[in-house]
Amino acid sequence: MAGVGSLTVVVVIVASTGTAGAATSVGATVLNPSYAKSIGFAKTVQAAKQTKVTTQKGCTASVEAVYENASGKTGLVSETLQCNSNALAIKALATAKKQVKVYPSFKAPKMLGSTAFVTGTDAPEYLIAWVNGTKVAITAIDVNIAASSTSTTVASSPLTTAQMKTLSTAALKQNSLYH
């Protein structure tokens, strides 16, 4: 989803936190195309891709996959950032959380733990971020790709209850990859 708001927001969090995420296999910690397709995101915009991160001590790489629905109006991003310890992952997420506004209308699923939060700071993109062990995980949904990819100010699209359910379900699926 290069050039689409979802990718931009996740990259902003990576850059601001300096966290990283890598897996034994590049795609093992992010949602795969088969799962994305099963929840309505049939187009793979960016297959799972690992990127080295060197902006924060103790965090080394990031893995990200990006998908779009058939109409090209809604996107899904799955990202894992890998740190060398749980303490570094928690610190990285806390740093990112200070830079966004937690979205008050929706709560992250309790199964994601006490660090999880939902933000709509970059609406029309909404994301859930959380820590699982040494990983910072991010699942995001962009509900208006056209608005996200423009450089002008566009009225944000609100997140519907159905979209939040899709986002929460995808985040829980991504979290299950770490067990």
Image (tube, helix red, strand yellow):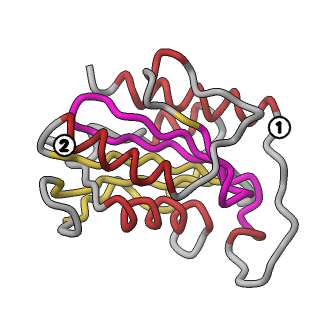
Q: In the image as oriented, which residue stretches furthest toward the top?
A: 111
Q: In the image as oriented, which residue stretches furthest toward the front?
A: 98
Q: Distance between the residues labelled 1 and 2?
A: 32 Å
Quarter of the image that includes the C terminus: top left
Q: Out of 8 and 75, give the one closest to the viewer.
A: 8
What range is drawn magenta here?
Answer: 118-145
Q: Out of 160 and 86, give the one closest to the viewer.
A: 86
Q: In the picture, residue 19 is in which quadrant?
A: bottom left
Quarter of the image that includes the N terminus: bottom right
Asked whether residue 125 is drawn in magenta, I would say yes
Residue occupying image coordinates x 66% and y 56%? 121
The amino acid sitting under disc 2 is: Ala
* Proximity of marks 1 and 2: CB atoms separated by less than 8 Å: no
The amino acid sitting under disc 1 is: Thr
Local SS, label 1: loop
Q: In this view, does 165 lie to the left or right of 20?
A: right
Residue highlighted by disc 1: 160
Q: Where is residue 153 in the image (x, y as percent from the top left)?
A: 80, 78
Residue occupying image coordinates x 63% and y 53%? 75
Q: Position of residue 103 (x, y in %)?
A: 69, 41
Residue highlighted by disc 2: 23
Residue occupying image coordinates x 47% and y 66%? 12
Counting residues from the start of the chain, the first of labels 1 and 2 encountered is: 2
